[in-house]
Amino acid sequence: GSGAAPLVLELHEGDRSMADLLGGKGAGLAEMTRLGLPVPAGFIITTEACRAFLTEGGDPVGLWDQVDRALSALEERSGLRFGDPARPLLVSVRSGARFSMPGMMETVLNVGMTDEVASALTVHGEAHFAWDSYRRLAQMYGRTVLGIDGSLFDEQLTAMRASLGVATDAELDAYALKRLTSSFRQTIREHTDTDVPQDPRVQLREAVRAVFASWNGERARLYRRHEGIADDLGTAVNIVQMVFGNRDDRSGSGVCFTRDPVTGATGAFGDYLPVAQGEDVVSGVRSPMDLAELGRREPALLEELRGHLRTLETHYRDLCDVEFTVERGRLWILQTRLGKRSPEAAFRIAAALVDEGVIDLDEALTRVHGAQLQTLLHPTFTVDESVPRLAHGLGASPGAAVGQLVFDAATAMEWAAMGRTVVLARPETSPDDFGGMVAANAVITSRGGLTSHAAVVARGLGRTCVTGVEGLFVDPVARTASFGPDITLPEGTVISVDGSSGEIFEGRREIEPSAVATAILDGSTWSTDPAVSAVLRLLAHADTRRTIEVHANAEIPEEARTARRYGAQGIGLCRTEHMLLGPRRELVERLVLDDDRAGALAEIEALALRELSELLEVMDGLPVVVRLLDPPLHEFLPDLVDVSVRAALEVERGEPDPETQRRLAAVQRWHETNPMLGLRGVRLLTVLPQIVDTQVRALALATARLRARGKSVLPELMVPLVADVAELVAARARIERIVDEVAEEQGIALAIPVGVMIELPRAALTAADLAAHADFFSFGTNDLTQTTWGISRDDAEANFLAPYREAGILKTNPFETIDETGVGALVRMATEAGRAARPGLGIGVCGEHAGDPDSVEFFARVGVDYLSCSPPRVPVVRLEAGRQAV
Ligand code: ADP
Ligand code: MG
Ligand code: MG
């Protein structure tokens, strides 16, 4: 080749730093060769060759010459010859890209097997081995190189097993395997007019080309899109001398880990299958034996394997997984890479490596991820196969919950108040259901995706939630829920909801609370469970490292208490509207539609005073940011359709009620087609200034009284949906007037900081102006994402966000992970402009993104002061913020 990078490299010429060129598998093989591990000899056709093949649409110039040279070297090294019946060399042709793409691309084993070789081996008394290897080649070559449907071969294997009355392929005798080889080749001839080539070099070339081409196979492309792997990397092809786990009964194949990848426990862990080639181990047809059993049969061999595992772990300083094969009692290592592990194993292994002096605590933090901690915080169902599944939907908010079915928010609240645990089932949820969702243990909906109202609110509250439940039909009138055509359950039926898997079960399943969550809530620093101890230890270390504070979004005292126990350093968002939705909506209705303004206002103020006092007291000593009323006015008013229908019915009956007509007129007066861009946030001050006044007054009064009792409460106020500085100036003047009034009444000095939410592009663009009148900024990234993209989160998921992601137009959901290039640019710009205009300006984030582990890294880079997330996410963000600081 004329390019700079080589097209072919021998295994002993490479090392682990060359993964771009050699692929992960190749780099691992090369590194193990250097370390002196027993790796069969071989060579690697580089990713450079694959890229040339794909862009030029054919074999790169000089490739086969280089392959021939490497093959001769391999023959020399092994003392065997390709296609030589007396001393046959067989090889595997294995794909292996830079990033592991398990099962996505192709591998052909036993390349070099021919009629001549098989006959010669048969003569030497190895008929079983010969025909087993040949039928495998025919099968893999037919499927991978020639594109024949693999099930055609599987069917013949099944039929052969049945006719001989055996359960597994390993029990097929040499004669059966020989007949299978013939019938596989017959199938190949029928479908392609070709046969398994009898020239091993042709086999090799065709297999290499097939591996190249598999890079662009449908499966591989989809996988890359999903994992965010670039399409132009290409795969390397590893040509490795075959060693035979199917040679005799002192041969076999296995997969093992340097530690237990499930629990994280120390000590090698793995599976071994006698008389097998590698792919049999994963296929799961025969049950393998564990390493202890292998050790009883071949103690020296296991000792040797353990030694290699120690070498690898010491070298890579992390959990490794290993493919190995034993041929006639001799051990060969065929692959290694960093091992995938369960969340609890990730923590336990990282902490163990610290104890063993392999890594330090900072590095241990880089070995775990917030998403792993998140999984560990959820309660789970104990394993029980006997409970039948009722239905299945999208796991929208994880957790395991049991409760009685109810179909409306009012019943949920009523029953919960009576001490029952309930599951709220709805076609979908709306802001009106908030109270019901708080009261419920779990929420299930028939419609909606992972970013539907139900999903978002449930995640915020830490409620288990399954959305888009297939076959679920809720009949609120009959008070039943149907799950498919055959099952209808009345209100009160106990069901179990798994918010991680999206499964729903009839009846009560046993729940185990998360040991990790319990330990964190209890403030433990140590546990008898090593995985729990590891989490506590790494979390504590993250706290010493991070500079970002972690606050919580909470309004209910109970949630705030939980947040605090989870380590929240304040409330970054208290949504005051929860006090006025649900059954209390009627108070606002009276204010807008009726004349009883004074009465309604007094009630609202009393409520606000009581609830804000409680919240402030729970958070004594820590800041609490209270947001002024935010939702669109229409959410507080009766439904236009309901009132219209009522009015029409009354007219039809000939007895129109003037009251209904008046309400209808008022609802029509305030009706908006696009309420999310309408009368909400700071704009409500034009219609409902009295509500805002009462909220401010209640907060000021609560503060004054608590301080008088010696509490050091730290309230702040935040103005939502500001687009222009004049709005902020007006709101601020109003707020300050009321705070001053209260201070005077109470005879104390009182100043409540006033901040502005940056959640409209215009606010971000005019951040310098806003900073002149704001004590702090808080990025409301949910609305900022909606308005920057011009996408309604509530509607878009099913309609086009999902198709966009499938088509690769969107790589991630911008409502889950912050869109760094667009929304992120506004966040960065506003932060810089705000701080330039007002040094020391506090900057927080209170959108859902603040609790997304993948977004924390961005906010850390921007340098915000705090992230405010739902209470159950607090430990996750603590960990993630610490990780970003090391
Ligand atoms: P994958 O990436 O799907 O694991 P591999 O290229 O690792 O594919 O190969 C598939 C199976 O064949 C593995 O179990 C591997 O250990 C085994 N294998 C690969 N090369 C050889 C070889 N030269 N000798 C024996 N077994 C091999
Ligand atoms: Mg492999
Ligand atoms: Mg908002």
Image (cartoon, helix red, strand yellow):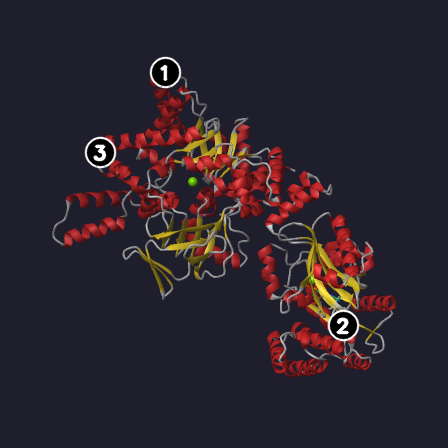
- Residue 747, picture quadrant: top left
Measure the C-alpha gap from mark 2 to mark 1.
94 Å
- On screen, residue 445 versus residue 687, left or right, reads right
Report x, y in % for residue 810.
53, 54
- On screen, residue 611 versus residue 163, left or right, reads left
Measure the C-alpha gap from mark 2 to mark 3.
92 Å
Q: Confirm whether residue 782 shows in the render.
A: yes
Report x, y in % for residue 391.
43, 60
Whether residues under marks 2 and 3 lie with C-beta atoms below 8 angstroms apart, the answer is no
Under mark 1, the amino acid is Gly
Quadrant in which the C terminus is drawn? top right
Mark 3 or mark 1, which is nearer the start of the sequence? 3
Between label 2 and label 3, give the one nearer the viewer: 2
Report x, y in % for residue 468.
42, 57
**Residue at 88% of width from left, 68% of height from top?**
76
Return the residue at label 1. Answer: 747
Return the residue at label 3. Answer: 596
- Residue 248 is tagged as 2
Measure the C-alpha gap from mark 1 to mark 3.
31 Å
Whether residues under marks 2 and 1 lie with C-beta atoms below 8 angstroms apart, the answer is no
Say what secondary structure mark 2 lies in. Answer: loop
- Camera-nearest residue between 472 and 383: 383
Between label 1 and label 3, give the one nearer the viewer: 1
Under mark 2, the amino acid is Asp
